[in-house]
Image: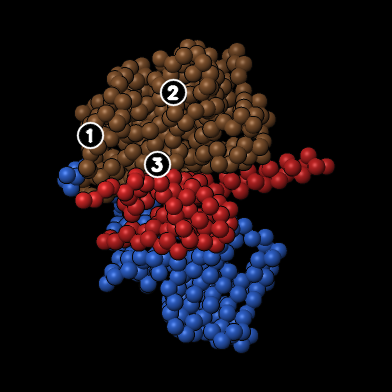
Amino acid sequence: MTESFFSRGFRGRRQPSATAGRLPPGQYETPDFPVLSAGPTPRPPLASWDFVLRGADGPVARWSWDEFQALPHVAVKADIHCVSKWSKLDTIWEGVSVDTLLAEAAARGVKSAPYVLAVSDGGYTTNLPLADVTGGKAWVAVNYDGAPLAPQHGGPARLLVPHLYLWKSAKWVRQLRFMEHDKAGFWESFGYHNYGDPWREQRYTGDP
Amino acid sequence: MKGDDMRASDERAADERADETLRLDGNAAAGILSEVFVPDLTTARATCANCGTIRAMGALLVYAHGMGTVIRCPACGAVVLRIARTRTHLWLDPTGASLVVMAGAPASSVT
Amino acid sequence: MSSGTLVTREPRGSSVPSRAPKIAWRLATVVDVVTETPRARTLVLDVPDWPGHRAGQHVDVRLTADDGYQAQRSFSIASAPEDVRIALTVQRLDDGEVSPHLTDVLRAGDRLELRGPIGGYFVWEAALGGPLLLVAGGSGIVPLMAMLRHRATALVAASMQARHGVPARLLYSARRWDDVFYRRELARLAEDDETLEVALTLTHEVPAGWTGFRRLIDRMMLAEVAWPPAERPHVFVCGPTPLVEAVAAALVELGHDPELVKTERFGPTGGSA
């Protein structure tokens, strides 16, 4: 009945874009920064906030907020792509490279492993191969667009992995756990692709 | 004084509420629930598997995340139900609900 | 000026139940687009095989572009269940994706894809009894107006005693006088019915000579307007999430039974993005 129906005069939010070449398949550019949430916004007091890298066999490296802020920060400009089809180009962030965190952790005896599980306040998790958070591909970001990262966008700190769909950039991240074996996170175990490469449009479980 | 404490905590609560604008009621999930369940689930009473609170599904908190519908217990915040739609399937994770009781029409007589 | 095309249907239950699934996508036809306020329009729709609805329910509306792109939003039904046509009142959000299309582009004769009625939780009908307390913020008035329209129709032939058994009060918050939906109709309903009271609060700007409330709804205002908890009113609160949560929390603090306070949060956009 409705296969061929379309709404006269409706185009939605999308606009023809000079940047179309930078958009992965099926994505639309947005000037906004949509907020998607699966739960209430966590509000950890900075005085008790910490960030942990946890080795597969137990040892941890832990930074308090002040210690974390004392690590070298870098600026990042990246395009971000949400599986719900919006993309935002040239977003500006500031944070600590995961490479830096790994090096610091290694100096404290924390050994990495082939897989990583990011764990956030509120219980959200997402999994990634180690190779996808190293080599300058991932950061723990604390600033967005020149200001401290707002709670609804994942502040005080979120993971940022722009080459994968944005659900991998875990908001409110508190831990990166190294794992010998891959373990599916919140969305990966519930319909979504385990890896999530926007350029191959790997949105859902079973997408090639 | 106590009045000031109340005002300060009222303001904090108001700030927190202002940030939770994405939170909706169980009714907001009624559309997608109607694709999964036959009876209207918003009036069904669900038991939270985490804390045991029993409320009508319409009174649960819905986070209509772009990737899926996440329904949480208003008492403890645990996920009671989540639904995701992929290209070809509807996913339902009912593990956060230990019981769902729906009012339904009496069973039709079969001959 | 408002839904003048009031046509009543037969009481529900008088026809053979349909075998079709109750909530399926259907193509409605736009009969009229009526201006309510500078930013809000009421869409009057003919829906084929409409199964009828209960006051408070909503529909999902889906727009499809010619390249297949789709956007979907929920809208509360403004019309009484007794009306043959359904009415949706939509407020235009300037940066919305769906609402500007509905308020500015849609015209009589166009078709609109929708499914419903949806949601059996946030509903009221006269048989449930009263007292009935309705609290609306902005476009949250829409489902509550369906309840008041239903109440007016259901009680039209009722005795004064019957009406006093289902008293109703509406507390409606809007930014300015011009943003108040159904102004004339609410005034008329309240004038014609001594068992209905309507209180407005304007939060941004008041007209000259305004004697009503002029602030955000707070606990004190609710204590003034609401029945005492001992009366056990049915309460329905609808509007943007922060208002709904503040009002619901205040009512519970005042002693109202949480099971009797039903909420419909519209989210940040007031429900019509």
Q: Are marks 2 and 3 in contact (CB under 8 Å)?
A: no
- Residue C90 appears in view: no
In the rendered structure, which amino acid carries the disc numbered 2? Arg
Of the image marks 2 and 3, the number of the one nearer the N terminus: 3
Q: Is residue A118 visible?
A: yes
Q: Which mark is residue C16?
A: 1
Tell me what residue is drawn at x 46 percent, y 14 percent: C159
Bin the neighbour count of mark 1 within 10 Å (Cα to Cα): few under 14, some 14-19, many 20 and up: few
Chain with blue colouring: A
Which mark is on residue C151?
A: 2
Residue B7 appears left or right of B69: right
Q: Residues within 10 Å of mark 2 (few under 14, many from 20)?
A: many
Q: Amino acid at mark 1?
A: Val
SS of the residue under disc 3: loop
What is the x, y in percent for residue C64?
25, 44
Q: Is residue C80 above or below residue C51?
A: above
Q: Earlier in the sequence, mark 1 or mark 3?
A: 1
The chain holding disc 1 is C
Marks 2 and 3 sit apart, C-alpha to C-alpha, by 19 Å
* Chain hosting mark 3: C
Count of all numbered marks drawn on residues in the image: 3
